[in-house]
């Protein structure tokens, strides 16, 4: 039975279609839903977790229809939103016990001890949660989400605002849960993390899935080679057949070509003839960021998406 399955899942807010005919499946994998600000990620997660009712289509979790069997869906899942409520005036253990009792877990103390151990929080279990680092709080939230042994877990931006080491640790835990057979549905705006840790990703834009697949496949299908160039001063545009100027991000000018190795010297020559002074030039593999840019569009990436990242960073404690 597929853990998550949607068919034509659609949600309107008034006349506005926030999620439009979503068809996705995820099973015993780490599935990443990526998309710019307002693209419909949260609305999708809310429908999948029974917190919002769709206007059209169906969604099922572990074989249970979200509309017909919401209670069974809820007992099969956990949802960790960005700002999950942990009581910082309680200890980690007290927070966990509260959750375990809320879910009616038999043997709550044993279960809590076990999860604190799994999330590497045992040594700090009796300290107040307000003394925890961001990464520890996030691990406590994950531990809480596991008390009733869900089959599917929804994580909204699980690593947002954490430092590199804490982010890595959270992903290690997510992977460990997945290895035990859990299906993980995660939203993230960290493309490098989605690339590295998600088995498959879906990029949603204007409520519709723009691309869906394994990161490696998406990169190989959607993009050609990327030639990265840094010039001294202003870039003087060149027009070269078979080489496409993608855009500029900071100092880096990006070009794509079918065969980057062959195009690189030709591009170097064209750039110099046009009057550019080349500081650095290299060939790189396409990244999921390139896939995102190509499928979502440059305009949105450089405006709304950045604002969105910033807004979320501020919201994070
Ligand atoms: N309750 C609501 N009433 C009206 N419009 C809504 C409501 N909830 C969401 N929307 C709109 O639906 C669209 C999708 O919103 P959603 O929150 O799902 O996007 P998102 O991809 O999660 O964005 P973000 O990354 O900013 O959280 C947005 O245009 C949003 O303004």
Image (cartoon, rainbow, N blue to C red):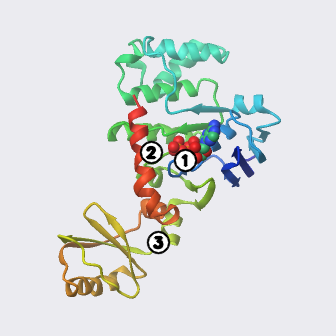
Q: Residue at left 38%, top 29%? A: 134
Which image quadrant for residue 303? bottom left
For marks 1 and 2, the one nearer the N-term is 1
Q: Which class describes the residues within 10 Å of circle 3: few (<14), some (14-19), or many (20+)?
A: some
For marks 3 and 2, the one nearer the N-term is 3
Extreme residue in the right direction: 68
Q: Considering only vertical position in the picture, is 19 above or below 161?
A: below
Label 1 residue SS: loop
- Residue 181 visible? The answer is no
Q: Residue 38 carries which label?
A: 1
Mark-to-mark CA distance, 1 and 2:
9 Å
Give residue 208's position: percent from left, percent from top: 63, 56
Give residue 106's position: percent from left, percent from top: 66, 14
Give residue 138's position: percent from left, percent from top: 45, 29
Q: Which class describes the residues within 10 Å of circle 1: few (<14), some (14-19), or many (20+)?
A: some
Mark-to-mark CA distance, 3 and 1:
25 Å
**To which residue does mark 2 refer?**
308
Determine the quadrant in which ligand 1 lies.
top right
For marks 3 and 1, the one nearer the N-term is 1
Label 3 residue SS: loop
Tag 1–tag 2 contact (CB < 8 Å): yes
Q: In this view, does 241 lie to the left or right of 176?
A: left
**To which residue does mark 3 refer?**
223
Query: Within 8 Å: ligand 1 and the Cβ of disc 2?
Result: yes
Label 2 residue SS: helix
Q: Is residue 281 left or right of residue 204?
A: left
């Amino acid at each position: 039975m597929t853990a998550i399955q949607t068919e034509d899942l659609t949600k309107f807010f008034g006349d506005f279609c926030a999620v439009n005919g979503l068809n996705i499946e995820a099973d015993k994998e780490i599935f990443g839903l990526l998309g710019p600000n307002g693209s419909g990620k949260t609305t999708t997660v809310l429908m999948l977790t029974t917190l919002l009712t769709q206007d059209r289509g169906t969604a099922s979790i572990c074989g249970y229809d979200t509309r017909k069997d919401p209670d069974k869906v809820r007992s099969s899942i956990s949802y960790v939103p960005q700002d999950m409520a942990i009581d910082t005036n309680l200890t980690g253990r007290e927070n966990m016990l509260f959750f375990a009792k809320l879910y009616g877990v038999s043997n709550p103390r044993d279960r809590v001890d076990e999860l604190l151990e799994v999330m590497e929080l045992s040594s700090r279990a009796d300290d107040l949660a307000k003394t925890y680092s961001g990464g520890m709080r996030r691990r406590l939230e994950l531990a809480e989400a596991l008390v009733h042994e869900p089959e599917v877990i929804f994580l909204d931006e699980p690593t947002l605002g954490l430092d590199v080491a804490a982010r890595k640790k959270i992903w290690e835990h997510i992977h460990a849960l997945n290895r035990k057979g859990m299906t993980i549905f995660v939203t993230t705006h960290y493309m490098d993390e989605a690339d590295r840790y998600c088995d498959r990703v879906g990029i949603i834009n204007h409520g519709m899935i723009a691309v869906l697949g394994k990161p490696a496949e998406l990169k190989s299908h959607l993009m050609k080679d990327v030639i990265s160039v840094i010039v001294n001063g202003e870039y003087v545009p060149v027009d070269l057949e078979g080489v496409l100027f993608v855009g500029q991000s900071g100092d880096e000018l990006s070009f794509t070509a079918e065969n980057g190795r062959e195009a690189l010297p030709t591009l170097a020559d064209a750039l110099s003839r046009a009057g550019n002074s080349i500081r650095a030039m290299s060939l790189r593999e396409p990244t999921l960021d390139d896939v995102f840019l190509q499928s979502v569009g440059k305009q949105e990436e450089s405006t709304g998406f950045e604002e969105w990242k910033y807004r979320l960073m501020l919201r994070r404690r």
